[in-house]
Amino acid sequence: MFGSSPVTVVITSEADTWDIDDSSCLGCGQFVDWDRMPDLEQQANIPRDILTKPKRELKKLAREGYWATSRALRAQVYHQLIQQVACRLVTPDALVYTDVASRLFGKQSVSSHPLPDFLEGCSMPTYCLTLEGVMALKKILICIGNLFPDITYSPILPSLVALLLHYSEEEAQCFENISRLIASNTTHTSYIDQSFLAHQASCMTFGDLANKHCPAAHRLIASASENVFEVYSEWLSWLFHDLPFNYAIRIFDVYLLEGQKVLYRIALALLKQYRLSVTSTELEGIDIKTDLQAFVQNIGEHVTVDKLLERAFGIRLFSRKEIWLLQMANRKALMERGMTMVQSRQSFHLAVDMQNFSSSIVTAQEMRIIWSWIPERFSLFPPLLLFSTSEDGCSLQRFYSCCEGYEPTVLLIKTTEGEVCGAFLSSDWSERRKSGATSGFFGTGECFVFTVRPEMERYEWVFIKKPELAKAVPRSRQRSPSPSPASLLGSSPGGQGTSSNRLTVPAPQRTKGRLSPFLAVRHFLLPSQTASMFMAGSREGIIIGGGGGRALALDTELLWGRTEHCETFDNPPLCQENFKVQLLEAWGFQNT
């Protein structure tokens, strides 16, 4: 793709030359212009046993900013923590760097070596490095490109090397430490994305997390930007390019101990803080991507670094494994679209076509908002109408036959009173037959229900808002069989189930050869299985949401329905409790 074309790099440094000479390795502290630091760090009494404390206690100290008081302490902690990172057996160390750097650069005072291709289009903050430090940064990046040829795209790497250089005794030490982070093979934990595919999957994962944990900010961005993903694709730049040094280095403190998950937390906290500082009217006619960048650059006017971290760790994310599963699912979706090299995401991020979209229930603008709620890996594909009562008739069996083979689907309902509601359903409707004609509930925690008119609102799985509730049940807890949809639909639409609070859900069956789904019930220890009743279907009707009521229930003629509060989504009734269907549509995702 690149051929012999020059690599374009945006340099944010006062230095006007990248000449390399041997004087760039000047020892500890010599890479940094301390006069340019936001404030001088004060030396502190360092307990002799600080480096032997257990990791849990080190996490607490890092979050509280303990090593921000001592450059020497921070340098020691960084080196020790990185040396403890599990990595590939053959990982280049300081001696390898010395040998390769000598071979590449020799005694030259000026280098003609190009920067690695993986820096194509990447910004390169240099923080408070001196000219010698900037030259050391370039040398390390060139050696990384030489020794790690599999790295094809890594916009975060220059920032991490620059931060490490502030606390390294020499170039070789900095190189060895960054190499260990690159070569980390810790299960479900990553430090540095090393390809465009991995980077884009991380951006999609952040978009999914923002959708779930920052609904107000997400709604604001979706209404003000034509391409929400383009805004979220800058999330790493917020942390390691736009934030001032004293914020970025505190993030680096916790990042070394907790991996990429902590970066998601802090970026989400920034997004929440941004939402508090702006209104919808203020964003009219403004480039929200640029406005967000300016906000982050001036974060000191809005929140201290301690308060930002406090809010970040107050966000309850799911486990590393669940986030890893989501990231793998996003990678898979991108690979299915052929995205593996450095290329524009725009051509693949297919939003709702505002000109050609046609629905009898919702407008193109309303569908665009609904599309912004669905997981990123599905929003790669445009909506495809699968079933409509106006065209296919009021037949449940016809609904099933039109929807089977599509995963996921979006259900839209318009009542005779003009109210509009619906659901995002994560699993193929054919799952209902896995255990026979009276199969129980299925689906995953990505399912959600929503209203469109009179107001747009989304109601997600209750454990997205309160994941800590899933930790209270011992692993020995047994699950009893799920009720059949027939038994739940046996009463009239207006009837109340008398045993819904005792209903439980079996573990979803594993499908050979498929990636384990994100937010699968079996990954959680749930205090009540009534809170994981996502979707069910039989010859008598369909149910979405359960436990204490049903978020949506429709009869076999798709003509009458009922909506109630349910434990799965903790939703209010989505429209009048007993309603008559005027129109119903099912939408899939056009992935071929």
Image: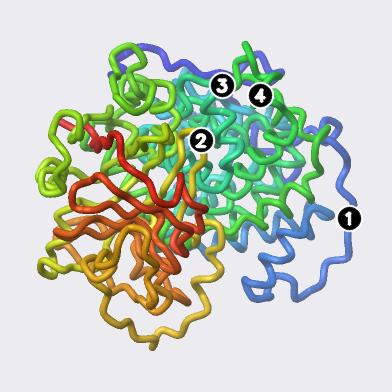
Q: Which amino acid does label 3 sit on?
A: Ala
Give the residue pinned by disc 2. Answer: 456
Q: Is mark 3 on a helix, strand or loop?
A: helix
Question: How far is the residue under mark 4 from the one under mark 3?
Answer: 8 Å
- Residue 536 makes an appearance in the image: yes
Instruction: Tell which tag, 2 or 4, sits nearer the viewer.
Output: 2
Give the residue pinned by disc 4. Answer: 280
> Sequence order check: which comes first, mark 3 or mark 1?
1
Question: How far is the residue under mark 3 from the one under mark 2?
Answer: 16 Å
Which numbered marker is on residue 224?
A: 3
Question: How far is the residue under mark 3 from the one under mark 1?
Answer: 47 Å
Question: Which residue is at a point 41% across and 71% down the rendered structure image?
Answer: 530
Question: How far is the residue under mark 4 from the one under mark 1?
Answer: 46 Å
> Sequence order check: which comes first, mark 2 or mark 1?
1
Residue 384: name its quadrant. Answer: top left
> Sequence order check: which comes first, mark 2 or mark 4?
4
> Sequence order check: which comes first, mark 4 or mark 3?
3
State the image coordinates of residue 277 (x, y, percent, origin top left): 75, 31
Question: How far is the residue under mark 2 from the one under mark 1?
Answer: 54 Å
State the image coordinates of residue 209 (x, y, percent, origin top left): 50, 46
Q: Which amino acid does label 2 sit on?
A: Met
Vertical comparison of 431 with 300: above or below = below
556 left or right of 83?
left
Q: Is mark 2 on a helix, strand or loop?
A: loop
Do the CB atoms of the residues marked 2 and 1 lie less than 8 Å apart? no
Give the residue pinned by disc 1. Answer: 43
